[in-house]
Image (cartoon, grey):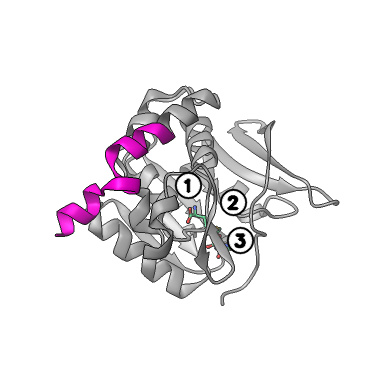
Amino acid sequence: MMQRHLQGSGMTSQRTRDRLIARLIEKGITDERVLEVMRVTPRHIFVDEALASRAYEDTALPIGYNQTISQPYIVARMTELLLENVETLNKVLEIGTGCGYQTAILAQLVGDVYSVERILPLQRKAKIHTELLKLKNIRYSYSDGSWGWEEYAPFDGILVAAAPNSVPEALLQQLAIGGVMIIPVSDQFGYQTLQRITRLESGFHVEDFDPVIFVPFLTGKE
Ligand code: SAH
């Protein structure tokens, strides 16, 4: 029964998932590692039963608590930008676990994932989802991600799934030399841009990518 649930059928079948991958390729995703992991990861188990039939549409979907599971294209794009130029990363910090979908994708591509979420019931859901997929290389923290996760720093990669107005200082400090951070940053008018920040010996190198729409990065715990 559980196996059937993971495999899916009809609107959650492998054929439907393959169509999503074709769509991601059309939209410009080229990293084979990312495409393969997204092809085999069942996104429908991360959303409520009532939304399962829409899990392989390329859209964000509600996960409760005013939050959304990120759009597949955005998950693919962020992961591709994070892994560009490297074979893999040992330690990756994720801010904004949500339902754990991006966490699950990362866990299949990097050494260890450290994921921080400020809404406890969402963290609980994420744990259930990633346990269902038998992913063991994930540590979860219920905290305000503005502080990063000092205990395990420095990180080779940091991926932020909510948009702040400026990059939190602690995240910059917890990035290893040579490490990369992927983060949507809001300007003063609320327009968000996906940025890649690389830490060099001499400072930080910032590159701008896609215009994006993320939920706001909030401080404190809920
Ligand atoms: N990748 C997730 C995206 C969830 S939406 C998924 O696909 O499910 C973004 C998440 O960031 C929300 O769950 C929100 O609660 C969380 N978030 C926002 N600000 C945060 C902060 N300061 N610290 C930790 N999590 C935060």
Label 2: state its secondary structure. helix
Dot 3 beta carbon under 8 Å from ligand 1? yes
Residue named by callout 2: 171
Q: Is residue 109 visible?
A: no
The numbered disc on residue 146 is: 3
How many residues crowd mark 3 within 10 Å: few (<14), some (14–19), many (20+)? some
Mark 2 and 1 residues: CB-CB less than 8 Å, in contact? no
Mark 1 and 3 residues: CB-CB less than 8 Å, in contact? no
Q: As displayed, is residue 220 above or below residue 75?
A: below
Viewer-side label of 2, 1: 2
What segment is highlighted magenta in the picture? 1-20
Q: Amino acid at mark 1?
A: Pro
> Magenta stretch: dominant SS?
helix
Label 1: state its secondary structure. loop
How many residues crowd mark 1 within 10 Å: few (<14), some (14–19), many (20+)? many
Instruction: Tell me how far mark 2 sits from mark 3, CA to CA.
Output: 7 Å
Q: If you read the primary sequence from the N terminus, does the residue marked by circle 2 or circle 3 appear first?
A: 3
Which residue is nearer to you in this view: 52 or 107?
52
Q: Residue furthest right?
A: 189
Percent x, y for residue 36? 33, 30
Mark 2 and 3 residues: CB-CB less than 8 Å, in contact? yes
Percent x, y for residue 211? 70, 38
Q: Residue furthest front?
A: 10
